[in-house]
Amino acid sequence: MVQDTSTRKETMGGREALVSERSARKPDKRGRRMALLRRAGLFGVDTEGAVIRRAVTAGDLVGAYRLVHEAFLERGYIRPMPGELRIRPFEALPSMATFVADADGEIVGVQGLAVDDPDLGLPSDGAFKAEIDALRRGGRLVCEATNQAVAPAYRKSAVATELMRAMFAHALLAGCDELITTVSPGHARFFELLGFEKASPVRSYSAELDDPTILMRVNVAQLLEWVEAADDRSDAAALFIKVRCVDGNPYREQVADWAEEAETLFGRPWDLRDLFAERSGLLDRVSDEARTVIRARWGAEVFDDVAAPALAVG
């Protein structure tokens, strides 16, 4: 769990204090939890043949958002959505990065990262705006891990944690200062192993459905300082993040190229029309405010080309 360590560092001396604080948190217990999860496949390297990459085409995104819809509907997190796709205004922003696990053309895992939009905000503002606004203070950039879903056959593989590695690599590229996510209370310990801490009381994520969730957050700079000091005497979580997510993260060499590929999608009106107008009907059902934001992010010419047929039909 990452906490503010400024006072401890002043009294005990820099990095040694940070390591001392981490070591005081029962690393053996954390190590045992990590070992159990690794035996279950989560922290290994075997994705059972699935390839981790960024979704860079409309077809990729259809497969990704369909899987998210299926998984969230099964768990009672959402009501059925048009086109059986979980698409919100945030998914229409070019800054939304969606990573997928591709098994021979079938999307079997998804992990998204939403970068705070100055006008639209973040997906979890609806339930946790006060807490997120506190993280934004001082101009800090907040990013949200969202749309986490894995097909049942791959839930005991490394798909979920490999997708998280890719997402974290993109968060570093985007310059995120605070990384947040919302989870059910029972999953909080898993994220605490990865350096997150609880940032809210339990609250329903949805205003329509009973969906108890908790906001988790990690300060990226503190996380990097913690793992930079990790060595063989450190707890397993610190070493995992250092070796797998920071120093040895292969996706850090790929995310910039993937971002360029994904950006081209938002210059292709026919793909945007297929995804956000025809399949999901998003442009017909969002608020005028959200439509204005999407138009600004796509560019007026592209947006008008995409939206005019949809609005005419509506």
Image (cartoon, rainbow, N blue to C red):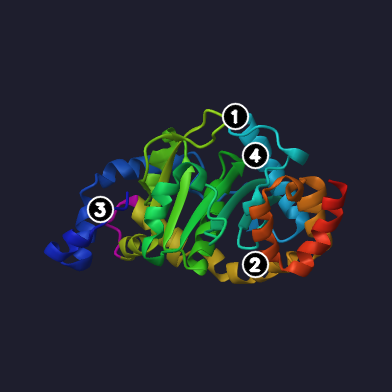
According to the image, label 2 marks what residue? 258
Question: Residue at horizontal 60%, vertical 71%?
Answer: 256
Tell me which amino acid carries mark 3: Arg
According to the image, label 3 marks what residue? 22
Residue 102 at x, y percent in the picture:
69, 51
Residue segment shown in magenta: 229-236
Report if the CB atoms under discs 3 and 2 are less than 8 Å apart: no
According to the image, label 1 marks what residue? 76
The answer to whether residue 243 is visible is: yes
Residue 311 at x, y percent in the picture:
82, 51
Tell me which amino acid carries mark 4: Ala
Question: How far, Cα to Cα, is label 3 from label 4?
Answer: 34 Å
Question: How far, Cα to Cα, is label 3 from label 2?
Answer: 35 Å
Report if the CB atoms under discs 3 and 4 are less than 8 Å apart: no
Is residue 188 shown left or right of residue 250?
left
Mark sitting earlier along the chain (4/2): 4
Tell me which amino acid carries mark 1: Gly
Question: How far, Cα to Cα, is label 4 from label 1?
Answer: 16 Å
The image shows residue 77, relative to residue 197, as above or below, that is above
Disc 1, SS: loop
Report if the CB atoms under discs 2 and 1 are less than 8 Å apart: no
